[in-house]
């Protein structure tokens, strides 16, 4: 809960967003380092959108970004398959890893189609994403955890940071505290309602707006903090971040797979940054937003490489 408690701006009711015309997320955009992170992301995304391949083959870049994002999200959820294996396979029900990859693919494929519903009912979209991930056979599919139900671990597999990233093998590391247990069902329901109210108010144009990166990072972090479902919370949180980036106009064609960047940065850095969000300190919140920004820039780098390969006739 601490992430949205920062500086007292997490409303008791989010209704003040509507009544006062103030975006409670706006203070986060002013934290040290955040304006720079926002500017760097904007520059990176604009550069990708200006690539000449985007003029002719944008739908193909979108499809490839969805595939690569799904592969990376599945890896973060415990199924680290090679990209070509994901591309080749058609059966995703054989074992637990295959089901994880299948869940990420289904969620990634439909996330961009849920934009109109997201604008007026984010919770309906989250339920739909969980239904896609869990499947009809799961009796908990599409509904938040109930009292006594436990959420699966967020990081079942340790992914090492890629060489050349800011959190690569030689990067200095601060100690990582254990993540606290997921909140109870009653608190989850209340906070989901508050988050939904905030997002809908933004859609309706109430007040000054925080940058897309900030909003996406808060939605991503809050869903990881809440772990509202019994399973697939990481996949759903990352898909929700993607939807926000589309809805806020930063990545309208969904060609910037931040999931790829999160996997490249490694699970240790992911956990550490999430711990900062949960702590709710200015440094922690800024660090989380910056981490999400780094991941997004790495995602744009991935799609830029795809564009370059297309331009050379290799794809």
Image: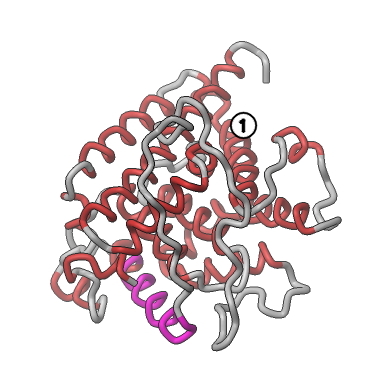
Q: Depth check: give the residue in front, 241 or 32.
A: 32
Question: Which region shows up in magenta?
Answer: 184-199
Q: Depth check: give the residue in front, 167 or 104.
A: 167
Q: Note whether 118 is above or below 61 in the view shown.
A: below
Q: Main secondary structure of the magenta part?
A: helix
> Which colouring convention does the figure follow?
secondary structure
Q: Label 1, on which residue?
A: 60
Point out residue 129 in the picture as x, y percentages from the top left corner: 59, 64
Q: Residue at x 47, y 50 (%)?
A: 242
Residue projecting furthest to the left? 20
Q: Secondary structure at mark 1?
A: helix
Point out residue 29 in the picture as x, y percentages from the top left corner: 21, 50
Side of 228 where 283 appears, left or right:
left
The image quadrant of residue 21 is bottom left
Is residue 132 rendered magenta in the image?
no
Q: Quadrant of the C terminus?
A: top right
Q: Quadrant of the N terminus?
A: bottom left
Q: Note whether 126 is above or below 291 in the view shown.
A: below
Q: Residue at x 45, y 78 (%)?
A: 183
Point out residue 98 in the picture as x, y percentages from the top left corner: 78, 52
Point out residue 190 in the picture as x, y percentages from the top left corner: 39, 82
Q: Note whether 135 is above or below 162 in the view shown.
A: below
Side of 152 where 9 appears, left or right:
left
Is residue 195 rendered magenta in the image?
yes
Residue projecting furthest to the top? 312
């Amino acid at each position: 809960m601490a992430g949205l408690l920062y500086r007292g701006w997490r409303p008791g009711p989010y209704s003040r967003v509507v009544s006062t015309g103030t975006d409670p997320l706006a203070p986060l955009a002013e934290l040290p380092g955040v304006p720079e992170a926002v500017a760097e992301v904007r520059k990176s995304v604009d550069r990708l959108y200006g690539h000449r391949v985007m003029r002719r083959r944008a739908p193909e870049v979108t499809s490839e970004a969805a595939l690569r994002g799904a592969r990376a999200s599945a890896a973060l959820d415990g199924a680290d398959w090679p990209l070509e294996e994901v591309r080749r396979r058609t059966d995703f029900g054989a074992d637990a890893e295959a089901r994880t990859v299948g869940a990420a693919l289904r969620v990634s494929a439909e996330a961009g189609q849920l934009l109109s519903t997201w604008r007026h009912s984010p919770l309906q979209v989250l339920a739909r994403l969980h239904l896609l991930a869990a499947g009809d056979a799961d009796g908990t599919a599409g509904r938040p955890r109930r009292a006594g139900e436990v959420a699966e671990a967020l990081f079942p597999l340790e992914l090492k940071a890629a060489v050349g990233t800011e959190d690569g093998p030689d990067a200095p590391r601060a100690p990582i505290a254990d993540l606290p247990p997921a909140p109870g069902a009653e608190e989850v329901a209340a906070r989901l309602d508050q988050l939904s109210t905030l997002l809908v108010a933004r859609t309706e144009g109430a007040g000054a707006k925080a940058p897309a990166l900030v909003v996406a990072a808060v939605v991503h972090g809050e869903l990881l903090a809440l772990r509202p479902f019994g399973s697939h919370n990481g996949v759903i949180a990352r898909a929700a971040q993607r939807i926000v980036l589309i809805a806020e106009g930063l990545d309208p064609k969904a060609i910037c797979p931040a999931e790829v960047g999160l996997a490249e940065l490694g699970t240790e850095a992911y956990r550490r940054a999430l711990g900062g969000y949960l702590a709710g300190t200015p440094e922690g919140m800024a660090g989380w937003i910056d981490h999400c920004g780094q991941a997004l820039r790495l995602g744009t780098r991935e799609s830029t490489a795809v564009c370059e390969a297309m331009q050379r006739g290799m794809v």
